Amino acid sequence: MKAKNELIFFPKWVAGRPGYAERIREVFEKHLEESGLRLTRQRREIMNYLLKTDRHLELEEIYQALRKYGIGRATVFRTLRLLEESKLVDHVTSSGGASRYEIQLERPHHDHLICIQCGGIQEVRWPELEAIQDKTCRQMGFEPSWHRHEIFGRCRRCAGTVA
């Protein structure tokens, strides 16, 4: 069973905000141009599909939804890679080990709690943990580029502790 509304820190008002999709498109087009590529209909369809979602999507889910428009699995794979390179999309590892994708632009930093039973992903923010990490990096003279926290376990519903 796939969880719905996982992208809790990416509420509808962000994606629906005037100009948001256009900013995504502009950043992507610039990245493509710098790579000697262009924004094709297929790439636009994939990008738009990601913009409309309320949960993290696997490559295969995107492919299955868009293949009726003549978009192949390899095109989805290559486009997701281009979107990641341009910092517009990021991935999280699912409970089965596959990558699941989310739009990243203008979203606050967050980490993920991944249910190994139902596959749901909960987004969480830990300002206290971020402060500890920042302080430790400064003390160690370490310049972090990025980090990712993914905690695997069972969600409240699957653990039987529904409040």
Image: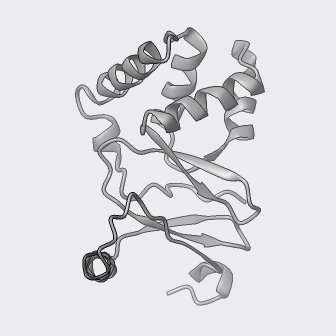
For the point 39% across and 63% down, the residue is: 110
- Percent from the top left, x then y, of residue 5? 49, 55
Q: Is residue 114 above or below residue 48?
A: below
Q: In x, y percent, where is residue 6?
A: 50, 58
For this rendering, which residue is in front, 128 or 138? Answer: 138
* Snapshot quadrant of residue 113: bottom right
* Residue 83 drawn above or below residue 144: above
Q: Is residue 24 above or below residue 6?
A: above
Classify residue 101 as left or right of residue 145.
right
Can you give x and y, in whole percent of width and height, for residue 163 in the image?
49, 87
Residue drawn at (66%, 51%), measured in percent from left and top?
99
Q: Residue at x 67, y 57 (%)?
A: 2
Spot occupied by residue 17 in the image (x, y as percentages of width and height):
25, 34
Indicate the colouring scheme. one colour
148 relative to 18, above or below? below
Please identify the quarter of the rendering in which residue 120 is found: bottom right
Quadrant where the N terminus sits is bottom right
Q: Residue at x 64, y 59 (%)?
A: 93
* Drawn side of residue 64 relative to residue 12, left or right: right
Can you name the residue that lies furthest to the bottom here?
Answer: 161
